[in-house]
Image: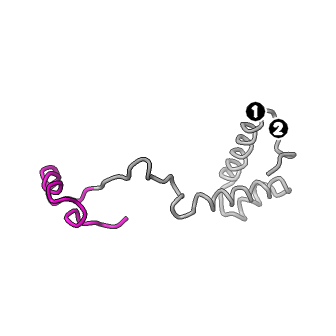
Amino acid sequence: MSYVNAEDVLPKKLVKEIQKYVDGQLIYIPRKNENSLSWGEKNGTKEKMAERNQTIVKNYYSGYNIEELSAAYYLSEKRIKGIIHEYESSKKRKLGGEENTGKNMEI
């Protein structure tokens, strides 16, 4: 986020009004809700992590164990288990809550 001088972008009347409340101080003006992005959307991190997690799940169902995946992806075993659990939970929701171990699920 870059610094912008209010006098360069706002009407003089508005600058004078704002100065009544925050004279000479820095002020943060948040984005409008319709313009806001969720975490990782701007720089692609969210998408990259989703792809990584999908690969972790595929490898798990291909026979790699939690310890191997943890070492390969530099993540804790607890996080690897969480990724697999998130995947299984989302599949159950998509399948209407059916019990499924994941071994025969399409990834």
Percent x, y for residue 97?
75, 32
Task: Say above or below: 65 vs 92.
Answer: below
Q: Is residue 21 magenta?
A: yes
Residue 100 shows which numbered tag? 2
Q: Quadrant of residue 8?
A: bottom left
| Separation of marks 2 and 1 at Cα, in angstroms | 11 Å
Quadrant where the N terminus sits is bottom left
Question: Which residue occupies 75% across, 37% down?
Answer: 92
Percent x, y for residue 30?
35, 52
How many C-alpha atoms fall within 10 Å of the one at disc 1: few (<14), some, or many (≥20)?
Answer: few
Question: The disc labelled 2 sits on which kind of residue?
Answer: Asn
Question: Which residue occupies 70% across, 53% down?
Answer: 80
Q: Is residue 78 magenta?
A: no
**Disc 1 marks which residue?**
96
Percent x, y for residue 15?
17, 57
How many C-alpha atoms fall within 10 Å of the one at disc 2: few (<14), some, or many (≥20)?
Answer: few
Question: The disc labelled 1 sits on which kind of residue?
Answer: Gly
Per the image, label 2 sits on a secondary structure element best described as loop
Q: Foreground: 63 or 42? A: 42
Question: Which residue occupies 77% across, 37% down?
Answer: 95
15 on left or right of 31:
left
Q: How many marks?
A: 2
Q: Foreground: 82 or 2? A: 2
Q: Which residues are magenta?
A: 1-27
Residue 23 shows which numbered tag? none
Closest to the camera, between mark 2 and mark 1, is: 1
